[in-house]
Image (cartoon, grey):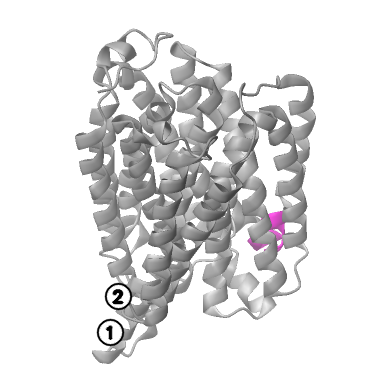
Amino acid sequence: MVVLDGTIVNIALPAAQRDLGMSDADRTWVVTVYALAFGSLLLLGGRIADYWGRKRSFLLGMVGFAAASALGGFAVSSEMLLIARGLQGVFAALLAPAALALLSVTFPSGPDRVKAFAVYGTIAGSGAAVGLLLGGVLTEYLSWHWCLLVNVPIAIVAIVAGIPLVKESRADGDRSYDVPGALLVTLGLASIVYGFSRAEEGWGQPQTIGFLALGVGIMVAFVWWESKARNPLLPLRVVADRTRGGAYLTSVMVGAALLGGLLYLTLHFQIVLGMSPLISGLASLPMAASIMLTAPQVARLLPKVGPRVLMTVGPLVAAAGLLWFSRVTVDGAYVVQVLPGQILLGIGLACVFVPMQNVALSGIEPRDAGVAGAALTGTQQIGGSIGTAVFTALFASAVTAATADGVQDPLQQQVDGYHVVFLAAAIGVACASIISWSMVRVSLERFREGASSEAVSMH
Protein backbone atom coordinates (compact mmCIF):
# COMPACT_ATOMS: atom_id res chain seq x y z
CA MET A 1 0.00 0.00 0.00
CA VAL A 2 2.82 2.41 0.88
CA VAL A 3 4.82 1.72 -2.28
CA LEU A 4 1.71 1.78 -4.45
CA ASP A 5 0.68 5.17 -3.08
CA GLY A 6 3.91 6.71 -4.27
CA THR A 7 2.69 6.50 -7.88
CA ILE A 8 -1.05 5.81 -7.85
CA VAL A 9 -1.79 9.52 -8.03
CA ASN A 10 0.53 10.06 -11.02
CA ILE A 11 -2.11 9.18 -13.58
CA ALA A 12 -4.75 11.09 -11.63
CA LEU A 13 -2.69 14.29 -11.56
CA PRO A 14 -4.05 15.84 -14.79
CA ALA A 15 -7.64 15.29 -13.61
CA ALA A 16 -6.87 16.55 -10.09
CA GLN A 17 -5.09 19.58 -11.53
CA ARG A 18 -8.12 20.52 -13.61
CA ASP A 19 -10.55 19.86 -10.77
CA LEU A 20 -8.66 21.83 -8.11
CA GLY A 21 -7.14 24.49 -10.35
CA MET A 22 -3.56 23.55 -9.46
CA SER A 23 -0.52 25.08 -11.09
CA ASP A 24 2.09 22.87 -12.76
CA ALA A 25 4.40 23.45 -9.78
CA ASP A 26 1.74 22.31 -7.31
CA ARG A 27 1.07 19.27 -9.49
CA THR A 28 4.67 18.14 -9.09
CA TRP A 29 4.59 18.77 -5.35
CA VAL A 30 1.70 16.31 -4.97
CA VAL A 31 4.28 13.63 -5.75
CA THR A 32 7.27 15.26 -4.08
CA VAL A 33 5.70 16.15 -0.71
CA TYR A 34 4.73 12.52 -0.10
CA ALA A 35 8.19 11.16 -0.87
CA LEU A 36 9.85 13.97 1.08
CA ALA A 37 7.80 13.48 4.26
CA PHE A 38 8.08 9.71 3.93
CA GLY A 39 11.83 9.62 3.39
CA SER A 40 12.88 12.32 5.85
CA LEU A 41 10.89 10.88 8.78
CA LEU A 42 11.66 7.21 8.19
CA LEU A 43 14.62 7.18 10.57
CA LEU A 44 12.48 8.44 13.42
CA GLY A 45 9.76 5.98 12.42
CA GLY A 46 12.29 3.17 12.54
CA ARG A 47 13.40 4.07 16.04
CA ILE A 48 9.81 4.39 17.25
CA ALA A 49 9.09 0.94 15.79
CA ASP A 50 12.12 -0.53 17.55
CA TYR A 51 11.44 0.89 21.01
CA TRP A 52 7.70 1.55 21.21
CA GLY A 53 6.81 -1.75 19.56
CA ARG A 54 6.74 -2.89 15.94
CA LYS A 55 3.19 -4.20 16.04
CA ARG A 56 1.83 -1.06 17.70
CA SER A 57 3.73 1.12 15.22
CA PHE A 58 2.37 -0.93 12.32
CA LEU A 59 -1.22 -0.59 13.51
CA LEU A 60 -0.96 3.13 14.33
CA GLY A 61 0.68 3.77 10.97
CA MET A 62 -2.18 1.97 9.23
CA VAL A 63 -4.83 4.01 11.07
CA GLY A 64 -3.08 7.31 10.37
CA PHE A 65 -2.43 6.45 6.74
CA ALA A 66 -6.09 5.58 6.22
CA ALA A 67 -7.22 8.85 7.84
CA ALA A 68 -4.83 10.90 5.70
CA SER A 69 -6.03 9.07 2.59
CA ALA A 70 -9.63 9.90 3.45
CA LEU A 71 -8.69 13.57 3.91
CA GLY A 72 -7.03 13.64 0.50
CA GLY A 73 -9.90 11.78 -1.10
CA PHE A 74 -12.30 14.51 -0.01
CA ALA A 75 -9.92 17.37 -0.85
CA VAL A 76 -11.58 20.48 -2.29
CA SER A 77 -8.43 22.56 -2.77
CA SER A 78 -4.81 22.04 -3.74
CA GLU A 79 -3.72 23.03 -0.23
CA MET A 80 -5.94 20.36 1.32
CA LEU A 81 -4.58 17.73 -1.06
CA LEU A 82 -0.96 18.69 -0.38
CA ILE A 83 -1.54 18.55 3.39
CA ALA A 84 -3.13 15.11 3.04
CA ARG A 85 -0.25 13.83 0.93
CA GLY A 86 2.22 15.13 3.50
CA LEU A 87 0.33 13.35 6.29
CA GLN A 88 0.31 10.17 4.23
CA GLY A 89 4.08 10.42 4.09
CA VAL A 90 4.33 10.98 7.84
CA PHE A 91 2.34 7.86 8.72
CA ALA A 92 4.00 5.84 5.96
CA ALA A 93 7.29 6.67 7.69
CA LEU A 94 6.00 4.82 10.76
CA LEU A 95 4.25 2.01 8.90
CA ALA A 96 6.96 0.97 6.43
CA PRO A 97 9.90 0.38 8.82
CA ALA A 98 7.62 -1.42 11.26
CA ALA A 99 6.49 -3.79 8.51
CA LEU A 100 10.03 -4.45 7.29
CA ALA A 101 11.32 -4.96 10.83
CA LEU A 102 8.52 -7.45 11.54
CA LEU A 103 9.56 -9.33 8.40
CA SER A 104 13.21 -9.34 9.48
CA VAL A 105 12.58 -10.66 13.00
CA THR A 106 9.97 -13.17 11.78
CA PHE A 107 12.44 -14.67 9.28
CA PRO A 108 15.84 -14.20 10.97
CA SER A 109 17.70 -16.75 8.83
CA GLY A 110 17.46 -19.70 6.48
CA PRO A 111 15.90 -20.20 3.04
CA ASP A 112 12.59 -18.76 4.26
CA ARG A 113 14.31 -15.42 4.80
CA VAL A 114 15.50 -15.34 1.19
CA LYS A 115 12.00 -16.22 -0.03
CA ALA A 116 10.37 -13.63 2.25
CA PHE A 117 12.62 -10.87 1.00
CA ALA A 118 12.06 -12.01 -2.58
CA VAL A 119 8.34 -11.42 -2.06
CA TYR A 120 9.03 -8.08 -0.39
CA GLY A 121 11.39 -7.09 -3.21
CA THR A 122 8.80 -8.02 -5.80
CA ILE A 123 6.20 -5.86 -4.07
CA ALA A 124 8.62 -2.96 -3.71
CA GLY A 125 9.68 -3.16 -7.33
CA SER A 126 6.29 -3.71 -8.95
CA GLY A 127 4.17 -1.65 -6.56
CA ALA A 128 5.00 1.59 -8.35
CA ALA A 129 3.83 0.29 -11.73
CA VAL A 130 0.78 -1.42 -10.24
CA GLY A 131 -0.08 1.93 -8.67
CA LEU A 132 -0.11 3.47 -12.13
CA LEU A 133 -2.47 0.76 -13.40
CA LEU A 134 -4.84 1.05 -10.46
CA GLY A 135 -4.75 4.82 -10.71
CA GLY A 136 -5.81 4.58 -14.33
CA VAL A 137 -8.73 2.27 -13.57
CA LEU A 138 -9.99 4.37 -10.67
CA THR A 139 -9.62 7.68 -12.50
CA GLU A 140 -11.29 6.38 -15.66
CA TYR A 141 -14.33 4.74 -14.06
CA LEU A 142 -14.76 6.58 -10.76
CA SER A 143 -12.72 9.73 -10.12
CA TRP A 144 -9.24 10.80 -9.09
CA HIS A 145 -10.51 11.01 -5.47
CA TRP A 146 -10.63 7.21 -5.33
CA CYS A 147 -6.89 6.98 -5.94
CA LEU A 148 -6.64 8.08 -2.31
CA LEU A 149 -9.83 6.62 -0.86
CA VAL A 150 -8.87 3.11 -2.04
CA ASN A 151 -6.35 2.94 0.80
CA VAL A 152 -9.07 3.01 3.46
CA PRO A 153 -10.52 -0.51 2.89
CA ILE A 154 -7.01 -1.93 2.38
CA ALA A 155 -5.93 -0.49 5.72
CA ILE A 156 -9.02 -1.85 7.47
CA VAL A 157 -8.27 -5.38 6.22
CA ALA A 158 -4.62 -5.08 7.31
CA ILE A 159 -5.62 -3.85 10.78
CA VAL A 160 -8.21 -6.60 11.30
CA ALA A 161 -5.70 -9.26 10.20
CA GLY A 162 -2.75 -7.74 12.02
CA ILE A 163 -4.26 -7.56 15.49
CA PRO A 164 -4.53 -11.36 16.00
CA LEU A 165 -1.78 -12.57 13.65
CA VAL A 166 1.19 -10.25 14.19
CA LYS A 167 3.28 -10.74 17.33
CA GLU A 168 4.69 -7.77 19.20
CA SER A 169 8.45 -7.25 19.27
CA ARG A 170 10.66 -4.43 20.45
CA ALA A 171 14.30 -3.70 21.09
CA ASP A 172 15.90 -3.81 24.52
CA GLY A 173 18.03 -1.11 26.08
CA ASP A 174 17.81 2.68 26.14
CA ARG A 175 14.44 3.69 24.69
CA SER A 176 14.98 7.46 24.60
CA TYR A 177 14.47 9.22 21.28
CA ASP A 178 17.03 11.34 19.47
CA VAL A 179 14.84 14.41 18.84
CA PRO A 180 17.72 16.72 17.76
CA GLY A 181 18.85 14.09 15.26
CA ALA A 182 15.31 13.76 13.89
CA LEU A 183 15.03 17.52 13.43
CA LEU A 184 18.43 17.77 11.75
CA VAL A 185 17.88 14.98 9.23
CA THR A 186 14.35 16.19 8.40
CA LEU A 187 15.41 19.80 7.88
CA GLY A 188 18.54 18.79 5.99
CA LEU A 189 16.78 16.51 3.53
CA ALA A 190 13.89 18.95 3.10
CA SER A 191 16.32 21.76 2.28
CA ILE A 192 18.15 19.63 -0.28
CA VAL A 193 14.96 18.53 -2.02
CA TYR A 194 13.55 22.07 -2.00
CA GLY A 195 16.83 23.38 -3.38
CA PHE A 196 16.68 20.95 -6.27
CA SER A 197 13.05 21.90 -6.89
CA ARG A 198 14.07 25.57 -7.16
CA ALA A 199 16.61 24.63 -9.84
CA GLU A 200 13.70 24.73 -12.28
CA GLU A 201 14.17 28.51 -12.24
CA GLY A 202 17.93 28.21 -12.72
CA TRP A 203 20.79 26.22 -11.22
CA GLY A 204 22.68 29.41 -10.42
CA GLN A 205 19.82 31.17 -8.64
CA PRO A 206 20.58 32.25 -5.04
CA GLN A 207 17.65 30.24 -3.65
CA THR A 208 18.81 27.08 -5.41
CA ILE A 209 22.40 27.36 -4.22
CA GLY A 210 21.38 28.60 -0.79
CA PHE A 211 18.98 25.78 0.04
CA LEU A 212 21.32 23.11 -1.34
CA ALA A 213 24.23 24.48 0.69
CA LEU A 214 22.05 24.77 3.78
CA GLY A 215 20.84 21.20 3.38
CA VAL A 216 24.35 19.81 2.98
CA GLY A 217 25.51 21.78 6.02
CA ILE A 218 22.65 20.47 8.14
CA MET A 219 23.35 16.90 7.03
CA VAL A 220 27.01 17.30 8.04
CA ALA A 221 25.79 18.51 11.42
CA PHE A 222 23.49 15.49 11.60
CA VAL A 223 26.38 13.07 11.05
CA TRP A 224 28.42 14.88 13.71
CA TRP A 225 25.54 14.76 16.17
CA GLU A 226 24.90 11.07 15.54
CA SER A 227 28.53 10.29 16.33
CA LYS A 228 28.12 12.00 19.73
CA ALA A 229 24.53 11.19 20.70
CA ARG A 230 23.95 8.76 23.57
CA ASN A 231 21.15 6.97 21.72
CA PRO A 232 21.46 8.09 18.09
CA LEU A 233 18.60 8.12 15.64
CA LEU A 234 20.84 6.46 13.05
CA PRO A 235 23.69 4.52 14.64
CA LEU A 236 26.61 5.02 12.29
CA ARG A 237 27.42 1.31 12.62
CA VAL A 238 24.34 0.62 10.49
CA VAL A 239 25.51 2.59 7.45
CA ALA A 240 29.29 2.61 7.99
CA ASP A 241 29.57 -1.04 6.97
CA ARG A 242 30.87 -1.06 3.41
CA THR A 243 28.43 -3.57 1.99
CA ARG A 244 25.33 -2.13 3.64
CA GLY A 245 26.46 1.36 2.66
CA GLY A 246 26.68 0.22 -0.94
CA ALA A 247 23.13 -1.13 -0.75
CA TYR A 248 21.84 2.18 0.64
CA LEU A 249 23.61 4.25 -2.04
CA THR A 250 22.27 1.93 -4.72
CA SER A 251 18.79 2.41 -3.27
CA VAL A 252 19.11 6.20 -3.66
CA MET A 253 20.06 5.97 -7.33
CA VAL A 254 17.44 3.36 -8.19
CA GLY A 255 14.75 5.28 -6.30
CA ALA A 256 15.48 8.44 -8.27
CA ALA A 257 15.16 6.66 -11.59
CA LEU A 258 12.12 4.60 -10.63
CA LEU A 259 9.91 7.24 -8.98
CA GLY A 260 11.08 10.26 -10.95
CA GLY A 261 11.35 8.46 -14.28
CA LEU A 262 7.94 6.79 -14.06
CA LEU A 263 6.27 10.17 -13.50
CA TYR A 264 7.54 11.45 -16.84
CA LEU A 265 6.76 8.20 -18.63
CA THR A 266 3.18 8.60 -17.43
CA LEU A 267 3.07 12.19 -18.67
CA HIS A 268 4.37 11.01 -22.05
CA PHE A 269 1.56 8.48 -22.28
CA GLN A 270 -1.19 11.01 -21.62
CA ILE A 271 0.17 14.26 -23.04
CA VAL A 272 2.07 13.08 -26.13
CA LEU A 273 0.53 9.72 -27.00
CA GLY A 274 -2.97 10.88 -26.00
CA MET A 275 -3.79 7.83 -23.87
CA SER A 276 -6.73 7.86 -21.48
CA PRO A 277 -6.01 7.26 -17.77
CA LEU A 278 -7.04 3.61 -18.09
CA ILE A 279 -4.97 2.94 -21.21
CA SER A 280 -2.07 4.76 -19.62
CA GLY A 281 -2.32 2.50 -16.59
CA LEU A 282 -2.49 -0.60 -18.77
CA ALA A 283 0.52 0.63 -20.71
CA SER A 284 2.48 0.64 -17.44
CA LEU A 285 1.69 -3.00 -16.70
CA PRO A 286 4.51 -4.68 -18.70
CA MET A 287 7.17 -3.31 -16.36
CA ALA A 288 5.34 -4.67 -13.31
CA ALA A 289 4.88 -8.04 -15.01
CA SER A 290 8.55 -8.10 -15.93
CA ILE A 291 9.54 -7.50 -12.30
CA MET A 292 7.15 -10.12 -10.93
CA LEU A 293 8.30 -12.77 -13.42
CA THR A 294 11.99 -12.04 -12.92
CA ALA A 295 12.11 -11.71 -9.11
CA PRO A 296 11.51 -15.42 -8.31
CA GLN A 297 14.26 -16.38 -10.76
CA VAL A 298 16.60 -13.87 -9.13
CA ALA A 299 15.81 -15.35 -5.71
CA ARG A 300 16.81 -18.80 -6.98
CA LEU A 301 19.94 -17.43 -8.62
CA LEU A 302 21.05 -15.43 -5.57
CA PRO A 303 22.62 -18.36 -3.62
CA LYS A 304 24.56 -19.39 -6.73
CA VAL A 305 26.10 -16.10 -7.86
CA GLY A 306 25.72 -13.87 -4.80
CA PRO A 307 24.29 -10.35 -4.58
CA ARG A 308 27.28 -8.48 -5.99
CA VAL A 309 26.89 -9.77 -9.54
CA LEU A 310 23.14 -9.23 -9.59
CA MET A 311 23.37 -5.73 -8.10
CA THR A 312 25.99 -4.83 -10.71
CA VAL A 313 24.29 -6.25 -13.79
CA GLY A 314 20.76 -5.19 -12.78
CA PRO A 315 21.36 -1.41 -12.92
CA LEU A 316 23.00 -1.74 -16.34
CA VAL A 317 19.96 -3.57 -17.72
CA ALA A 318 17.67 -0.96 -16.14
CA ALA A 319 19.79 1.83 -17.63
CA ALA A 320 19.42 0.23 -21.06
CA GLY A 321 15.65 0.40 -20.63
CA LEU A 322 15.78 4.08 -19.69
CA LEU A 323 18.04 4.81 -22.66
CA TRP A 324 15.40 3.17 -24.84
CA PHE A 325 12.85 5.67 -23.49
CA SER A 326 15.19 8.56 -24.35
CA ARG A 327 14.50 7.93 -28.05
CA VAL A 328 10.72 8.46 -27.97
CA THR A 329 9.18 10.65 -30.66
CA VAL A 330 5.91 12.52 -31.02
CA ASP A 331 4.42 10.04 -33.49
CA GLY A 332 6.27 6.92 -32.32
CA ALA A 333 4.48 3.65 -31.59
CA TYR A 334 4.25 2.45 -27.98
CA VAL A 335 5.12 -1.14 -28.93
CA VAL A 336 8.36 -0.04 -30.58
CA GLN A 337 9.51 2.94 -28.52
CA VAL A 338 8.30 2.10 -25.00
CA LEU A 339 7.49 -1.59 -24.49
CA PRO A 340 11.04 -2.99 -24.95
CA GLY A 341 12.37 -0.40 -22.52
CA GLN A 342 9.76 -1.35 -19.93
CA ILE A 343 10.76 -5.01 -20.12
CA LEU A 344 14.44 -4.19 -19.73
CA LEU A 345 13.74 -1.81 -16.86
CA GLY A 346 11.63 -4.42 -15.05
CA ILE A 347 14.28 -7.13 -15.40
CA GLY A 348 16.99 -4.78 -14.18
CA LEU A 349 15.00 -3.59 -11.17
CA ALA A 350 14.19 -7.15 -10.11
CA CYS A 351 17.90 -8.01 -10.22
CA VAL A 352 18.54 -5.09 -7.87
CA PHE A 353 15.63 -5.19 -5.44
CA VAL A 354 15.79 -8.83 -4.34
CA PRO A 355 19.46 -8.92 -3.27
CA MET A 356 19.46 -5.30 -2.08
CA GLN A 357 16.69 -5.92 0.47
CA ASN A 358 18.61 -8.89 1.86
CA VAL A 359 22.05 -7.29 1.91
CA ALA A 360 20.90 -4.04 3.52
CA LEU A 361 19.53 -5.90 6.56
CA SER A 362 22.09 -8.69 6.84
CA GLY A 363 24.27 -8.66 9.92
CA ILE A 364 21.99 -6.17 11.68
CA GLU A 365 21.46 -6.60 15.41
CA PRO A 366 17.80 -7.10 16.40
CA ARG A 367 17.74 -3.73 18.19
CA ASP A 368 18.65 -2.01 14.90
CA ALA A 369 16.19 -3.87 12.67
CA GLY A 370 13.69 -1.03 12.53
CA VAL A 371 16.16 1.74 11.81
CA ALA A 372 17.99 -0.38 9.21
CA GLY A 373 14.72 -0.99 7.39
CA ALA A 374 13.93 2.71 7.66
CA ALA A 375 17.31 3.62 6.19
CA LEU A 376 16.73 1.32 3.22
CA THR A 377 13.20 2.51 2.47
CA GLY A 378 14.15 6.10 3.24
CA THR A 379 17.02 6.16 0.79
CA GLN A 380 14.72 5.01 -1.99
CA GLN A 381 12.10 7.64 -1.15
CA ILE A 382 14.64 10.42 -0.75
CA GLY A 383 16.18 9.35 -4.04
CA GLY A 384 12.72 9.55 -5.58
CA SER A 385 12.00 13.02 -4.21
CA ILE A 386 15.41 14.34 -5.27
CA GLY A 387 15.08 12.62 -8.64
CA THR A 388 11.65 14.17 -9.23
CA ALA A 389 12.98 17.63 -8.35
CA VAL A 390 16.09 17.25 -10.51
CA PHE A 391 14.18 15.80 -13.46
CA THR A 392 11.62 18.62 -13.23
CA ALA A 393 14.41 21.19 -13.43
CA LEU A 394 16.09 19.37 -16.34
CA PHE A 395 12.77 19.00 -18.14
CA ALA A 396 11.98 22.71 -17.79
CA SER A 397 15.45 23.67 -19.01
CA ALA A 398 15.17 21.35 -22.02
CA VAL A 399 11.74 22.72 -22.98
CA THR A 400 13.04 26.28 -22.66
CA ALA A 401 16.05 25.42 -24.82
CA ALA A 402 13.83 23.78 -27.45
CA THR A 403 11.64 26.89 -27.58
CA ALA A 404 14.71 29.11 -27.94
CA ASP A 405 15.91 26.90 -30.80
CA GLY A 406 12.69 27.58 -32.69
CA VAL A 407 10.74 24.40 -31.91
CA GLN A 408 7.10 25.48 -32.24
CA ASP A 409 5.23 22.20 -31.69
CA PRO A 410 4.33 21.94 -27.96
CA LEU A 411 4.43 18.14 -28.14
CA GLN A 412 7.91 18.18 -29.65
CA GLN A 413 8.99 20.50 -26.84
CA GLN A 414 7.66 17.96 -24.35
CA VAL A 415 9.48 15.10 -26.07
CA ASP A 416 12.75 17.05 -26.06
CA GLY A 417 12.32 17.40 -22.30
CA TYR A 418 11.65 13.68 -21.90
CA HIS A 419 14.85 12.85 -23.78
CA VAL A 420 16.92 14.75 -21.22
CA VAL A 421 15.03 13.27 -18.24
CA PHE A 422 15.40 9.65 -19.33
CA LEU A 423 19.05 10.12 -20.28
CA ALA A 424 19.77 11.58 -16.84
CA ALA A 425 17.88 8.72 -15.17
CA ALA A 426 19.90 6.17 -17.16
CA ILE A 427 23.18 7.76 -16.11
CA GLY A 428 22.09 7.72 -12.47
CA VAL A 429 21.16 4.04 -12.55
CA ALA A 430 24.41 3.17 -14.30
CA CYS A 431 26.25 4.82 -11.40
CA ALA A 432 24.47 2.36 -9.10
CA SER A 433 26.20 -0.46 -10.96
CA ILE A 434 29.61 1.05 -10.20
CA ILE A 435 28.65 1.50 -6.55
CA SER A 436 27.52 -2.11 -6.19
CA TRP A 437 30.60 -3.57 -7.84
CA SER A 438 33.01 -1.52 -5.74
CA MET A 439 31.23 -1.67 -2.36
CA VAL A 440 29.13 -4.83 -2.05
CA ARG A 441 31.31 -7.56 -0.55
CA VAL A 442 29.26 -10.50 0.71
CA SER A 443 30.47 -14.04 1.34
CA LEU A 444 29.00 -16.25 -1.38
CA GLU A 445 29.34 -19.24 0.94
CA ARG A 446 26.68 -17.78 3.20
CA PHE A 447 24.13 -17.74 0.40
CA ARG A 448 25.12 -21.19 -0.84
CA GLU A 449 24.41 -22.56 2.61
CA GLY A 450 20.89 -21.16 2.43
CA ALA A 451 21.45 -18.15 4.66
CA SER A 452 22.66 -19.71 7.87
CA SER A 453 21.88 -18.16 11.21
CA GLU A 454 25.23 -16.48 11.35
CA ALA A 455 25.61 -12.93 10.16
CA VAL A 456 26.74 -12.29 6.65
CA SER A 457 30.50 -12.20 6.35
CA MET A 458 31.30 -8.72 5.07
CA HIS A 459 34.65 -7.18 4.42
Task: Quadrant for residue 196, please give it.
Answer: bottom left
Going from N to C along the chain, the mark reached first, 2 or 1, is 1
Give 313 or 229, whichever is nearer the viewer: 229
Query: Can I make out residue 332 in this image?
Result: no
Q: Which residue is mark 2?
A: 416
Q: Which residue is mark 1?
A: 401
Residue interval drawn in magenta: 139-148
Q: Are marks 2 and 1 in contact (CB under 8 Å)?
A: yes
Mark 1 belongs to which amino acid? Ala
Judged from the image, the secondary structure of the residue bearing numbered disc 1 is helix
| x then y, percent, for residue 278 | 57, 59
State how far apart marks 2 and 1 are (Cα): 9 Å
Label 1 Cα neighbours within 10 Å, binned few <14 / some 14-19 / many ≥20 = some
What residue sits 64% from the left and 39% below the top? 95
Mark 2 belongs to which amino acid? Asp
Query: In the image, is residue 453 above or below residue 338?
Result: above
Q: Quadrant of the N terminus?
A: top right
Residue 379 within the magenta-colored segment of the rendering: no
What residue sits 41% from the left and 47% below the top? 224
Q: Nearer the viewer, mark 2 or mark 1?
A: 1
Dominant secondary-structure state across the stretch colored magenta: helix
Give the side of residue 259 with respect to residue 31, left or right.
left
| x then y, percent, for residue 198 | 43, 75
Query: In the image, is residue 449 above or below residue 95?
Result: above
What residue sits 38% from the left and 84% below the top? 410
